[in-house]
Amino acid sequence: MLITETAAVGAVAALLGMALGEARGGGTDALLRGSADLAPYVKGWLLLPSAGALFLVPGLTVLLLTAVSVVPARGATRKSPTEAMKGW
Protein backbone atom coordinates (compact mmCIF):
# COMPACT_ATOMS: atom_id res chain seq x y z
CA MET A 1 0.00 0.00 0.00
CA LEU A 2 2.83 2.39 0.86
CA ILE A 3 4.51 1.78 -2.50
CA THR A 4 1.27 2.33 -4.43
CA GLU A 5 0.59 5.53 -2.52
CA THR A 6 4.11 6.79 -3.19
CA ALA A 7 3.77 6.02 -6.90
CA ALA A 8 0.42 7.85 -7.07
CA VAL A 9 1.79 10.90 -5.25
CA GLY A 10 4.83 10.86 -7.56
CA ALA A 11 2.66 10.78 -10.66
CA VAL A 12 0.52 13.67 -9.46
CA ALA A 13 3.62 15.67 -8.45
CA ALA A 14 5.28 15.07 -11.82
CA LEU A 15 2.20 16.12 -13.78
CA LEU A 16 1.62 19.14 -11.56
CA GLY A 17 5.26 20.18 -11.88
CA MET A 18 5.13 19.87 -15.66
CA ALA A 19 1.91 21.90 -15.83
CA LEU A 20 3.29 24.64 -13.59
CA GLY A 21 6.55 24.72 -15.52
CA GLU A 22 4.72 25.03 -18.81
CA ALA A 23 2.50 27.78 -17.42
CA ARG A 24 5.54 29.67 -16.16
CA GLY A 25 7.28 29.21 -19.50
CA GLY A 26 4.19 30.44 -21.33
CA GLY A 27 4.05 33.51 -19.12
CA THR A 28 7.71 34.26 -19.75
CA ASP A 29 7.17 33.75 -23.47
CA ALA A 30 4.26 36.23 -23.43
CA LEU A 31 6.36 38.70 -21.47
CA LEU A 32 9.21 38.46 -23.96
CA ARG A 33 6.85 38.85 -26.91
CA GLY A 34 5.40 41.96 -25.29
CA SER A 35 8.79 43.64 -25.07
CA ALA A 36 9.49 45.78 -28.12
CA ASP A 37 13.23 45.12 -27.85
CA LEU A 38 12.98 41.34 -27.56
CA ALA A 39 9.89 40.57 -29.67
CA PRO A 40 11.86 40.11 -32.93
CA TYR A 41 14.02 37.45 -31.30
CA VAL A 42 11.18 35.33 -29.94
CA LYS A 43 8.77 35.65 -32.86
CA GLY A 44 7.44 32.26 -33.88
CA TRP A 45 8.84 30.43 -30.85
CA LEU A 46 6.56 28.13 -28.94
CA LEU A 47 8.47 26.19 -26.34
CA LEU A 48 6.61 22.98 -25.61
CA PRO A 49 7.98 19.70 -24.27
CA SER A 50 8.26 16.87 -26.75
CA ALA A 51 5.72 14.06 -26.71
CA GLY A 52 8.38 11.69 -25.38
CA ALA A 53 9.08 13.99 -22.44
CA LEU A 54 5.39 14.07 -21.55
CA PHE A 55 5.57 10.33 -20.86
CA LEU A 56 9.20 10.01 -19.82
CA VAL A 57 9.25 12.55 -16.98
CA PRO A 58 6.22 11.23 -15.05
CA GLY A 59 7.27 7.66 -15.76
CA LEU A 60 10.79 8.17 -14.41
CA THR A 61 9.43 10.07 -11.42
CA VAL A 62 7.06 7.26 -10.51
CA LEU A 63 9.80 4.66 -11.05
CA LEU A 64 12.28 6.54 -8.88
CA LEU A 65 9.83 7.18 -6.05
CA THR A 66 8.63 3.59 -6.12
CA ALA A 67 12.20 2.31 -5.92
CA VAL A 68 13.00 4.64 -3.03
CA SER A 69 9.86 3.68 -1.10
CA VAL A 70 10.67 -0.05 -1.11
CA VAL A 71 13.16 0.17 1.78
CA PRO A 72 10.79 1.97 4.21
CA ALA A 73 7.93 -0.29 3.15
CA ARG A 74 9.95 -3.41 3.92
CA GLY A 75 10.94 -1.98 7.27
CA ALA A 76 7.32 -1.17 8.08
CA THR A 77 6.18 -4.73 7.35
CA ARG A 78 8.71 -6.17 9.82
CA LYS A 79 7.52 -4.10 12.80
CA SER A 80 4.34 -4.25 14.77
CA PRO A 81 2.23 -1.06 14.68
CA THR A 82 2.92 -0.29 18.35
CA GLU A 83 6.66 -0.73 17.86
CA ALA A 84 6.67 1.52 14.82
CA MET A 85 4.85 4.28 16.73
CA LYS A 86 7.27 4.32 19.68
CA GLY A 87 9.55 6.86 18.02
CA TRP A 88 6.76 9.41 17.55
Image: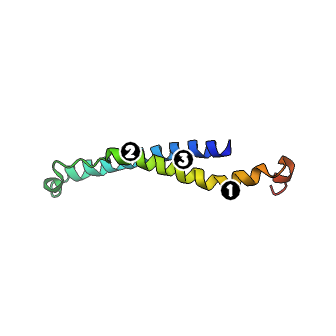
Mark 1 and 2 residues: CB-CB less than 8 Å, in contact? no
Inspect the image, locate mark 2, and give the three-letter code of the amino acid beneath it: Leu
Residue 65 located left or right of residue 25: right
Given residues 34 and 15, the one toward you in this image is 15
Q: Secondary structure at mark 1?
A: helix
- Nearest-to-viewer mark from 1 and 2: 1
Inspect the image, locate mark 3, and give the three-letter code of the amino acid beneath it: Gly
- Choose the circle earlier in sequence order: 1 or 2: 2
**Mark 1 and mark 3: Cα distance apart in space:** 16 Å
Residue 19 locus on image (x, y percent): 41, 44
The label shown at residue 10 is: 3
Inspect the image, locate mark 1, and give the three-letter code of the amino acid beneath it: Val
- Nearest-to-viewer mark from 1 and 3: 1
**Picture residue at 59% right of the left edge, 50% below the top:** 66
The label shown at residue 88 is: none
- Choose the circle earlier in sequence order: 1 or 3: 3
Quarter of the image containing the N terminus? top right
Which residue corresponds to mark 2? 54
Residue 44 locus on image (x, y percent): 16, 47
- Choose the circle earlier in sequence order: 3 or 2: 3
Q: Residues within 10 Å of mark 1 (few under 14, many from 20)?
A: few
Which residue corresponds to mark 1? 71
* Residue 75 figure quarter: bottom right
The number of callouts visible is: 3
Q: Secondary structure at mark 2?
A: helix
Residue 35 locus on image (x, y percent): 19, 53
Report if residue 17 is visible in the image.
no
Quarter of the image containing the C terminus? bottom right
Mark 1 and 3 residues: CB-CB less than 8 Å, in contact? no
**Picture residue at 77% right of the left edge, 49% below the top:** 77
